[in-house]
Structure formats: C-alpha cells, structure tokens
Amino acid sequence: MSADTEPDPRTVTFRSADGRERAYVFAELPCPGLHDDVQHAFTATLGQASALATSDQYFSSLRRFLSFLDTLGEPFAALSELRVRHFEQYRASRAVTVSQDAWGREVSVLFRLLKNAPYGSLSPELGDQVIRPGHLREVGVRVVRPRSQPVPLYSRRELDRLLAAARTDAARTAAPGGPGLEEGGLAPMLVLATALSALRASEIHDLSAEHTMADSGGRAVLVRAHLARQPGSRTLTWAVGGGEGDWLRQAGDFYLMVHRLTAHARRASGSDRLWCVWTPSGPRVPAGPSLARFLSGWAADRRLSGDDGRPLALTLPRLRSTVRVAAAG
C-alpha cells in the first residue's frame, strides 16, 4: 500500500495491497477552508489501510460530512472552528436516513480520521472527544456502537397511503414535456426507490448512472453498486417489464425512468451519479444529509398521517424495514 499527493497537490492517490489504485480529489469537495487539514488527516490514516473498500469508506464519510457542513452556511476557514455541536447537528440530519448502528460506525470513521489531523488543529472541546472516545460525554455524539433497537414498522394502511402519494407525485414529475427531476421532486422518488429496491438510503444515494441491459430470460438492467457491510461492489439485477406504468412498481423500470429524468442534469454537470438533479444553484447530486429535509417537508406538504391521526414521521430506514418484512411474508 502507498498513499501520496503527487503530482496534483489536491489529489491523494491510494494503492491497495493488491495493486489497484484510486485517486481522491479534494478540490471537488465543499468547505475549501478545511481541505488542508482533512487531506492531511486522510493521507495519514491511509497509512494504516490496505484495501480500496477502506479508503473508499474514509473518503465517502468525509464527503458526506463536508457536504453537510456546507449546508450550514458557516464560512469554515479552519478545522479549529469545528465544534461538538456540529456533530450533534449532523447526527440529527442523518437520523432520518440511517440507523443508530450506521451512525455509530460513521462517527467512528470520522473520529479515526480526525485523530490524524495536524497537531493543534482541533478545538480543545472536539479534541477531547476525538482522543478519548471511550469516555464521551452525554452530548449526542457516540463512538461506542449503540445498542440496537427494533425499527418500528409502518402499518399496512400507512404504507399504502405513503406509496399512493409517492406514485401520484412521481407520475407528475415524469409527465412528458417536464424539466426532468428537480430537487423539489426528490422525496417521492426516494420513497419509491426504497420501496422497490429495499436498498439503504446511502446505497440509493450513491447509485451510478452506468448500467447495462440484459435480455437473457427476460429484460433486466444491471447496475454496479456499493452495498453497506460488503467489500467492493456487486451487480444488482432488476427485471424490466417495459409496460407504461411498470416504472411505478418495478425496480428496473424505475431505475431507467430516473436515469431518463436526470439525463439532462447529468450531461450539464458531467456527473456519473444517477441522482443528479436540477437545483436553484445548478445541476448537482444533493448531499446525503440534506435528504432528510426533503422527506420531512414532502410528508408535511402532503399531510401524511399515521393510523393515530398524527403527522407521519417519514424515514427511509423505517420504510425499508417495513417493505423487507412485507416481502418476507
């Protein structure tokens, strides 16, 4: 394994133990004021890694965290401006799309990276949390994996109402002559993506636009994906029906519809990601942590309610658990 920053000072090239290489471009990340210190931490941490799956995990965690910080509107000029409250806010935003266990793993990765930040670059408050993870104060940031709690499921009636609303709004987005998929139309699409694929929110968010079609024993779309808790990538095979409304009920047809709706934004931005959408600031892939506000805002606008008559708390982990249990019979 080797890691270096040549020839581009804003790119870290990692070579795994099996000889494969990956280039991580920090210039493309948000919060440029933090780049020097986080790149130093990233490079130092890679000195203890041997697999691409590990380096990918480190960089993905950094990218998600910096993308979240960018949404706060604070002009971070140095790593020393980070506080524990920023991790509390990050945890709150991630709670909608990831489980407690997943959060525990993610913050552990981030703290492992920050341990290798330049000496004196962390505030005393945050530095205390990072160097003593076994003695964390009760401030909401937990490195020790929390005890797993069963994810509450939606009732059959709640699930039916949720999916009916998502299909209605998704069909409106896909109407001929429309602008394609815009940021404001993401929520119902994410609901359907979760219900049809049963993937985790982070796995859906990271889906590639690159795919192949197969016709062996029926049409299917093949997509490479990075799945949580599995090293490397694997190929997902989703059947394609091809009927007019199949995209609202089959994962393969749905993927192809999203691919079509995001094609223009993807060409304009040069992105290779499936979920590249139009935003007020131009075409881009929304940061994973920002998905929470789209989901909660959409559920409130649609006045979705639970069986108890109260507003429905919409989270993708809960939806995923519900459809997985329903599929198991």
Image (cartoon, grey):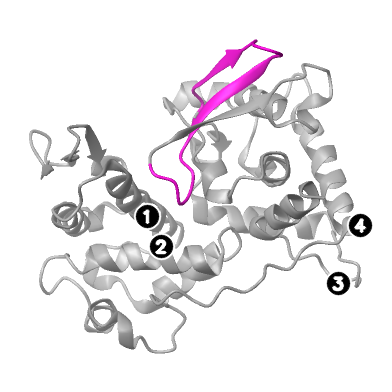
Up-down: is 240 above or below 5? above
Task: Judge whether residue 161 is colored magenta.
Answer: no
- Give the alpha-carbon distance from disc 3 to disc 4, as whole Å: 14 Å
Up-down: is 110 above or below 47? below
Q: Amino acid at mark 3?
A: Arg
- Residue pointed to by mark 3: 310
* Mark 3 Cα-neighbour bin, 10 Å: few <14, some 14–19, many ≥20: few
Up-down: is 136 above or below 204? below
Residue in view at x 44 percent, y 69 percent = 104
- Give the alpha-carbon distance from disc 2 to disc 4, as whole Å: 34 Å
Which circle's residue, 4 or 1, is located before the other in the chain? 1
- Residue pointed to by mark 1: 61
Q: Secondary structure at mark 1?
A: helix
Task: Judge whether residue 212 is colored magenta.
Answer: yes
**Where are the magenta residues, as a range?**
209-231
Question: Front-most of 320 and 259?
Answer: 320
- Image coords of residue 124 (percent x, y): 22, 83
Question: Is there any visible trace of residue 90 in the rendered image?
Answer: no
Question: Front-most of 121 and 178?
Answer: 121
Q: Amino acid at mark 1?
A: Ser
Mark 1 or 3: in front is: 1
- Give the alpha-carbon distance from disc 3 to disc 2, as whole Å: 32 Å
- Residue 231: name its quadrant: top left
Q: Are marks 2 and 1 in contact (CB under 8 Å)?
A: yes
- Give the alpha-carbon distance from disc 4 to disc 1, as whole Å: 36 Å
- Image coords of residue 233 (percent x, y): 43, 36
- Image coords of residue 227 (percent x, y): 49, 44
- Give the alpha-carbon distance from disc 2 to disc 1, as whole Å: 7 Å
Q: Amino acid at mark 2?
A: Glu
- Residue pointed to by mark 4: 157
Task: Determine which of the numbered discs, if any, sits on residue 106 in the image.
Answer: 2
